[in-house]
Structure formats: structure tokens, C-alpha cells
């Protein structure tokens, strides 16, 4: 059950490195805005220049905003993201269909 900072700085980059072809199949750039303790803003590139950078790289196709507590739940069980979305606890801006592809990297 990693916190958001660990998830974005270690876990997600490791998953991308372990299977770059799978990451590229997602074909999108995401901006994550995580609020609360251990929160922050990260850009996750699963399109061309694969990787995660802290901050807003300015080229995202989909923005996802949620709390650090919710992010821990999503990290443990990516399927919970849909429940959080429909309850209003996870907000998606831009191409929301791209967000559904994230499960390929998070699980």
C-alpha cells in the first residue's frame, strides 16, 4: 500500500521499465493531481518519452485528480477507480476513456 509519492516516483516508473511495450500501448500522457499528505502533481508519459516527471509537463491528454487516501486505494485495487469516479471522489478532465487504460500499468 504505497503512498502517492512512492507510487509515482518508484512503483509506476518500475512498471514502465519492466514492460515498455505495454506502457506504449496505452498511448497517452496523463497529469495526476493528488491532494493531501504525500500528494503532489506528476506527469506520466505512456506515449512517446516513457516515464514519470514531477510537476505538470504541459502536454497531458487526460488529467486525474483525487486525494492521496484515494490514490492508495487505487494502487491496491485499480478497479476501485471507477467507484471513486462515480462518487465524485476522482475527477477526470480531458479524454476520460484514456483513464480506463491506466489499469494496464497499475495492475
Image (tube, grey):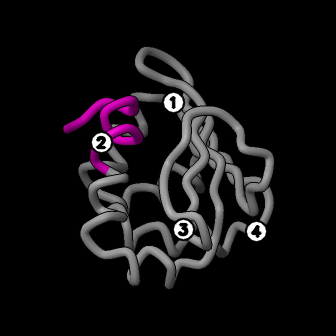
Precedes in sequence: disc 3 or disc 1: 3
In primary-sequence order, the first of circles 4 and 2 is 2
Q: Nearer the viewer, mark 2 or mark 1?
A: 2
At x 55% / y 31%, what residue is drawn?
A: 34
Q: Which mark is residue 67?
A: 1
Expressed as whole percent of the image width and height from the top left, the position of residue 52 reads: 50, 48
- Using the image, tell me which numbered label, if any, was put on residue 77: none
For the record, the magenta segment spans 1-11
Horizontal relation, residue 14 to residue 88: left or right: left
The secondary structure that dominates the magenta segment is helix
Do the residues under discs 4 and 2 have CB atoms within 8 angstroms?
Answer: no
Q: Which numbered disc, 4 or 3, marks the residue that appears first in the sequence? A: 3
For label 3, count other residues whose C-alpha is less than 10 Å away and answer few (under 14), some (14-19) or many (20+). Answer: many
Number of the label disc, if any, that sits on residue 95: 4
From what the image shows, is residue 55 above or below residue 20? above
Using the rendered image of the protein, determine whether residue 23 is visible from the camera's viewpoint: yes
Which residue does the image show at 58% across and 64% down from the upper left? 49
Furthest residue toward front? 49
Determine which of the numbered discs, if any, sits on residue 10 in the image: 2
In this rendering, which labeled residue sits more in front, label 3 or label 1? 3
Q: CA distance from mark 2 to mark 3?
A: 15 Å
Indicate which disc, 2 or 1, sits on the residue closer to the N terminus.
2
Residues under labels 2 and 1: Cα distance? 19 Å
On the picture, is 26 further left or further right than 71? right
- Secondary structure type for disc 2: helix
Amino acid at each position: 500500500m504505497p503512498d502517492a509519492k512512492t507510487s509515482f516516483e518508484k512503483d509506476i516508473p518500475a512498471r514502465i521499465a519492466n514492460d515498455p511495450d505495454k506502457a506504449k500501448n496505452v498511448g497517452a500522457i496523463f497529469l495526476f493531481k493528488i491532494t493531501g499528505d504525500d500528494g503532489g502533481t506528476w506527469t506520466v508519459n505512456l506515449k512517446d518519452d516513457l516515464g514519470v516527471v514531477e510537476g505538470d509537463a504541459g502536454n497531458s491528454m487526460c488529467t486525474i485528480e483525487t486525494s492521496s487516501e484515494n490514490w492508495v486505494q487505487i494502487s491496491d485495487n485499480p478497479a476501485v477507480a471507477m467507484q471513486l469516479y462515480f462518487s465524485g471522489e476522482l475527477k477526470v478532465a480531458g479524454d476520460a476513456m484514456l483513464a480506463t487504460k491506466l489499469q494496464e500499468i497499475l495492475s
